[in-house]
Amino acid sequence: MIAMLALNRTAPIFLLLVSVICFALYGALGMPKPIELWKWMDIIGEGGTALMAALWMLLVLGSRPGGRVTFLLAGGLLAITLGAWSDCLDEFFVIPASQYWDNWLEALTPIGMLTITVGLYFWREEQFSLNEHMQKRERLFRDHRSFDRITQLSNADYLRRQIRIEQNRHPEHEAALVLLDIDRFHLVNREHGQREGDRLLQAITHLLLLNLRQQDLVCRYAGDRFAILMPDTTPMQASRAALHLQQAVATLAHHTREGTRVHISARTVFASVSIDADHLLAELNAALEMAPLTGMATA
């Protein structure tokens, strides 16, 4: 949280500065009220609202990365804090009726509420996107023993079981299997080290998940080879999907920890899921070995 606040320290500093300015403005242009005219319930309510809104703003800034949603939520809470603080200062100072600036300050509260509402809308859209991403992994969580440690994808054994399940569950529906192999991946490990190779595999995993449908299953088949099981998919659709994944991998802007750009490409093969899993994978692996670099073939 402290690290996040360090990155978003502008808003707290601005809030503190403006709060001091507001106090000085009320003190300079207003007349202090006698203590017997203070309304303690209003002071506690309005002052408490300002303190809580400021605390919520710090929590938002300390728990979220920068971006549109964070900006709207924190900005709305900042406006509510300043509006409630101005309301609270009204309990200590009398502002002449001819001056309207204090009314404008108090109007920050509804403006802040509107800003937060917009931020919550975009936060809702953000959550939908994250939930969809997690749902693509949901099939993997059913069998923790099948996890690959590096990519958190399932392995070849789990893939074989899912192919058999798909064939038995929907024998009348077409399904496709795509194998994707990273070209010259061994050079990444040789030139940049195995840790960078692992980071690249993780980046490719996220890329594949983002470019596939919710019902598709991504597995780490072996080494730098990925398998994608695609239910309700015709050969033509599988061909387009495989080409799309190749292009997505080719445009991946992956940088090492030292800042070096790693240019990568991939080969893909695909086939209909019409035979048993072992024979299907054997045919696809053989086709992939024959495929030229940055190419696509069918088995």
Image (cartoon, rainbow, N blue to C red):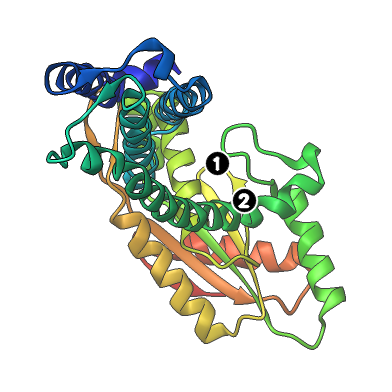
Of pointers 1 and 2, the one earlier in the residue sequence:
2
- Work out whether 72 lies above or below 32: below
Residue beneath disc 2: 134
User: In the depicted view, which residue is nearer to us: 292 or 139?
Assistant: 139
- Work out whether 195 lies above or below 73: above
169 with respect to 83 (left or right): right
Residue drawn 60% across the image and 54% down it: 131
58 with respect to 105 (left or right): right
Residue 262: where, in percent of width, then height?
Answer: 27, 39
- Work out whether 235 lies above or below 131: below
Q: Tag 2, which secondary structure? A: helix
Residue 92: where, in percent of width, then height?
Answer: 32, 19
Mark 2 Cα within 10 Å, few/some/many (few <14, many 20+)? few
Residue beneath disc 1: 223
Q: In this rendering, which labeled residue sits more in front, label 1 or label 2?
A: 2
Q: Amino acid at mark 2?
A: Met
Calculate the distance from the C-alpha at mark 1 to the C-alpha at mark 2.
24 Å
Residue drawn 63% across the image and 45% down it: 153
State which quadrant residue 151 falls in.
top right
Image quarter (top left, top right, bottom left or bottom right) of the C terminus: bottom right
User: In the depicted view, which residue is nearer to us: 214 or 24?
Assistant: 24
Residue drawn 16% across the image and 39% down it: 101
User: In the depicted view, which residue is nearer to us: 200 or 109?
Assistant: 109
Image quarter (top left, top right, bottom left or bottom right) of the N terminus: top left
Residue 121: where, in percent of width, then height?
Answer: 46, 57
Tag 1–tag 2 contact (CB < 8 Å): no
Looking at the image, the residue that sits furthest to the right is: 168
187 with respect to 199 (left or right): left
